[in-house]
Image (tube, helix red, strand yellow):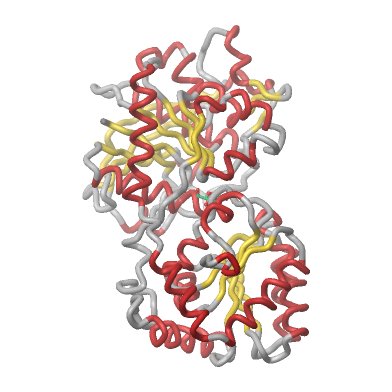
Amino acid sequence: MEIFHIGAECYPVAKVGGLGDVVGALPKYQNNAGQLVRVVLPRYETKFIQENEFDAVFSGVVKLGISEFSFNVLKERTNKLGYELYLIAIPTLFDRKEIYGYEDDIERFLSFQIATLDWITTRNEIPTIIHCHDHHTGLIPFMMQCANKYERLQTVPTVITIHNSIYQGQFGFDKLYYLPEFDLSKAYLLEWDNRINSLASAIKCASAVTTVSPNYLNEINDWAYGLESLFRLVKDKSKGILNGIDTEVWNPATDNMLETNYSIKNFQKGKQENKEKLCTEFNLDPKKPLFSFIGRLLEEKGADLLPHVAAMALSEHPKEINILVLGSGNAEIENQLTHLQTSFKGNYNAVIGYNEELAHLIYGGSDFLLMPSRVEPCGLNQMYAMRYGTIPIVRRTGGLKDTVIDFGDNGNGICHDQASVSDVCYSIQRAVNLYKDKKKTNDIRKLGMQIDHSWESVCQQYIEVYNLILEQK
Ligand code: GLC
């Protein structure tokens, strides 16, 4: 099979969150499983892109209404990532510092999608499957099905994987003329709630819809930011597939971002040494349990609770615990987290920013990882944490519910149900008590380290979806 993955992020080329990890890993494992896999994403100004060599393989011009943007398709020369990597270079739209967050994001990602299809449609071979990720690629199934100029791709089955249904890529019908010519009687396939909605259109048009965990699929049938009734309509072509993790990148035995490598055989010593390194660097106490948070500082992740949780937990357990936060996002949350540094010196620290290397060390050196998410379609951090012997403390939602079971039920973590300060603090209280029982704590760590969340088996589930839609064709 020749599979194209199209997305806005792909680690290590460009990453903001978990989407990048998944689009970076799944293709590699599909390739290992014998498929021909290509990944397509925009050419941003990232370190990886600047440091690697690419060849131009195609060039063209995207027409977006009356605007025209020249583009090149660049192919990474060595296939070093384990699959063929293609970048769509549209300098005026993507030569910028950030990946998202611009006023013209609609124009940027629509141009990316059109350029990608302009290129794919001219290739000799027609792909077996086009696999899109999130709303940034959500108009591709529609365009393949309906746009006159992509008629050649009309019968190629498509998959949309939903990593998060909060973001839907909506815009007004006043921009309908941006899209390549199509039979206007098909415009209803673009519409949701009187606007063009990229994600809704993908859900309507794709041959299969997947979500990144089974429980998230159940949840969005009840509540999905206005799309719930649409999800219910497409139940028969939907499947929840729990993400894997890249066990080559995330392996405490070989991870060169750690101070000390370790495995299940010597994790106590290994974790302690990583903890000491962290505590020295961030002025914390290595004798006390270390609770960390890693991620985007957004309400969706429950990050607004963190400043209150930290203040309350550190007051309730003075000098008994450490809290360390790494992340960036909402400016108010960033300020509140920074402010706390003066009140709880020696037991609390916050690093505002994105730092992949530090994240690895935090998984290695922490005792507990906090994930108070309001919404978590899958969540990868709890799986990284467990692989590094760090016990996750999670709100039972989305993929967190599929992957973490409370230790009271002989599970691998600590769970609570509400996204509230008191629920998180209660879990911290339970963790503090648990930590006093070294044997039990270590047993839970070992349980987590032994779980197999590798992509090998997950990969097969996607192949099953592909086979099913190929048969239906
Ligand atoms: C998004 C979701 C997260 C998921 C990731 C990868 O970032 O918020 O829960 O793990 O995508 O699928």
Is residue 328 visible to us here?
A: no
Number of residue marks: 0
Quadrant of residue 33 in the image? top left
Quadrant of residue 152 in the image? top left
| Image quarter of the C terminus | top left
Report the front residue among 447 and 419.
447
Q: Image check: 118 left or right of 328?
A: left
| Image quarter of the N terminus | top left
**Position of residue 448 measured from the top left corner of the image (x, y, whole percent):** 45, 67
Report the front residue among 48 and 288.
288
Q: Kindly identify the residue that appears in the image at 38 percent across and 66 percent down.
A: 450
Report the front residue among 19 and 232.
232
Q: Kindly identify the residue that appears in the image at 59 percent across and 87 percent down.
A: 436
**Position of residue 194 measured from the top left corner of the image (x, y, whole percent):** 73, 22
In this rendering, the answer to whether 230 lies above or below 57 is above
Q: Kindly identify the residue that appears in the image at 61 percent across and 28 percent down.
A: 200
In this rendering, the answer to whether 53 lies above or below 231 is below
Is residue 109 visible to us here?
A: yes
Quadrant of residue 420 in the image? bottom right
In this rendering, the answer to whether 268 lies above or below 67 is below
Q: Image check: 253 left or right of 111?
A: left
In this rendering, the answer to whether 313 lies above or below 449 is below
Q: Image check: 437 left or right of 159?
A: right
Q: Kindly identify the residue that appears in the image at 52 percent across and 25 percent down.
A: 236
Report the front residue among 279 and 314.
314
**Position of residue 325 measured from the top left corner of the image (x, y, whole percent):** 61, 73
